[in-house]
Image (cartoon, helix red, strand yellow):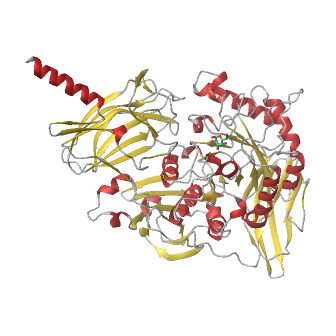
Amino acid sequence: MKNGSKLFTLLFSTFSLLSNTTLYGTEKTIWLDEIDSHGYYIQDWGSPQVNRSVVGTPMSIGGREFSRGIGAHAISRMLFDLGGKAKKVQGMAGPDDTNLFATNLEFKIIGDDKELWSSGVMKRGDAAKPFNVDLSGIDKVLLLVDMCDDEFMYDHADWAEVRFITDGTDVRAIPVWPEPIHKEPYILTPKAPDTPQINNPKVYGATPGAEFIWSVMATGKRPMTYSAEGLPEGVDIDTTTGVMHGVANIKGDYKVILTVTNNLGSNSCEVTIKIGDRISLTPVMGWSSWNCWRFDASDEILRRTSDIMHEKLHDYGWSYVIVDDGWEASKRTSEGILNGNTNWPDMKALTGYIHSKGMKFGLYSSPGPTTCGNFPASYKHEYIDAQTWADWGVDYLKHDYCSHTLVEKDSSEGSIRAPYDIMRDALDLTGRDIVFCVGYGAARVWHWGPDAGGNQWRTTCDITDSWNVVQAIGNCQDVCAPSTAPGRFNDPDMMVVGEVGGGWGAQKHPTLLTPDEQYSHVSLWAILSAPLLLGCDMEKLDDFTLSLLTNREVIAVNQDPLCAPAVKKVTENGQIWYKPLADGSIALGCFNMQPYFALWNQDDGEAMQLRDYDFEIDFAELGITGSATIRDIWRNADEITGVKDRYNISVPYHGVKFIRIIPENADVSCR
Ligand code: GLA
């Protein structure tokens, strides 16, 4: 090579290195970190970071640092329009070294509807995997980070040094899901009749010797009178409020007939009160302060919230009012007691207020020295804290796995579980019935949560009101669903309906989910037997949100005493989830989830992508032999009787059709 051309090559490659976008003859190099994402990239937690990991640190995979790329979080989707003109995409991918747990994730490059490259399952510490993928003839390409079966929701995932090589044309980021067509909220829930209607779950558990608090929960015109026949000795009912209170000392299954009467009629229902070893036999239904109030909740807010819950929701089963992180004083007393801060003048008076309505109170801590929000937590103070809470009358503890990694470097399952065993023991010693929620941050918790005495456990990172997040969380709950049982529930986090946002930094705002997405969200949480925890501003409950929360048949699916694990079936058009109910019927939801590949299966553009989809229910797959009635759960009405073999259902974009299939021989006497 002549000196001149050497100089040219040197100058050109220097120019190439310095330039972000490089033209090489007819070739153009477009770096991923240079593409304007227009906010279109979506992921289930945090936001994608340019040239940094998702938590803002330098990108690092298997000990090697990278200066450019995108720091994402699984599940993450980035979709690009190549106009059929791209040649290649090259780069490297791997889990970021900041991952707290072992991590199990997979990077995929999908071109139109074909998988072009997969990293295979990768774990924290693996070396970055290089790729050089041919894109000839490909119109749209998706960079996907997928979670893998057993580990999910805490995955920091890096796309490093990624660039597209094109024939000179640009690469455009485009939305993964088309914007839904605006639809006004529409109410399906029928108005409750003026005659009394009891909504209690069919089963309730308490331990002998513990304070017993439960209510007859019924809609109907006031005033009403209440009675309960067959209550365990030591428990009485207030006939004007329906609150059942006392202490039951003798173990056993008590068949209790609840009756509610007003001047228009009366309603009776049999429930079983189990005095034994287990509590929370059906999922908790309540409200937690975090998604709306962050660290600013107060005694006053909780009192107001409990008033509203009592007035509008308690008749349907909503009972728990919970303060999340931020109630704690900055220091313990000289005796080691952790009191509330100035927002919480008298915890015992507050719980007394809530209990007087027949409702319950919950609070928050962590097994490490500090909570997720940096307040003092229960490390080495488990016994004194549990006793303090029991003295206050606490009924529920959310125990997030925060800061324990500061005192325990080993991230094996046993080490993560150990402080939960201690707290369970501490709670048991108090003799109070306290629902134990193994909180956010503990890996693979559904494997050990039941043995650690958890009544529920957070399976995911924090929810926000975006369809991407809600469907990502919902989609993967089949992995942990088999752990569901009475008193043992997977918690996919609080529901994002109503006015939310204050908790995760955004200004409070009406949920960004569309009405159809909200129906999907509530239906899925119901069929999953998930704890139903609201996170909205209760003072701003609008009619639509209220209708989502007061549908007795939707709630009955959630509170079904069988607590059977829901099963997911992926179809071409979305997902079908179903679970058997105690009365022999089957609850089933067809969800038009719009899998990402659906985007490329359409010939005529966006309008097609927003269409309704048809689902076929095959009775044989559900084990139904004879004919059955199809009941529309949201409308509380039979849709059709005498159906045999199969049933077809049409579902709107991101919406759901939620039905009960009632075989001829099912006993459906009590809702
Ligand atoms: C974690 C949890 C949230 C909330 C905060 C409090 O992020 O997932 O639900 O409890 O901690 O600090």
Q: Is residue 110 above or below residue 540?
A: above
Q: Position of residue 191 (x, y in %)?
A: 67, 76
Q: Nearer the viewer, residue 201 or 81?
A: 81
The residue drawn where x is 55% and y is 70% is: 185
Q: Is residue 594 above or below residue 8?
A: below
Rendered image quadrant of residue 343: top right
- Please indicate whether residue 472 sits to the left or right of residue 176 in the image: right
- Please indicate whether residue 606 sits to the left or right of residue 190 in the image: left
- The picture quadrant for ligand 1 comes to top right
Q: Nearer the viewer, residue 465 or 547?
A: 465
Q: Residue furthest bottom?
A: 264
The residue drawn where x is 45% and y is 29% is: 96
Q: Nearer the viewer, residue 500 or 529?
A: 500
Q: Position of residue 245 (x, y in %)?
A: 88, 55
Q: Residue furthest front?
A: 4
Q: Is residue 431 visible?
A: no
Q: Is residue 647 visible?
A: yes
- Please indicate whether residue 235 sits to the left or right of residue 96 in the image: right
Q: Quadrant of the N terminus?
A: top left
Q: Position of residue 432 (x, y in %)?
A: 83, 42
Q: Position of residue 630 (x, y in %)?
A: 51, 71
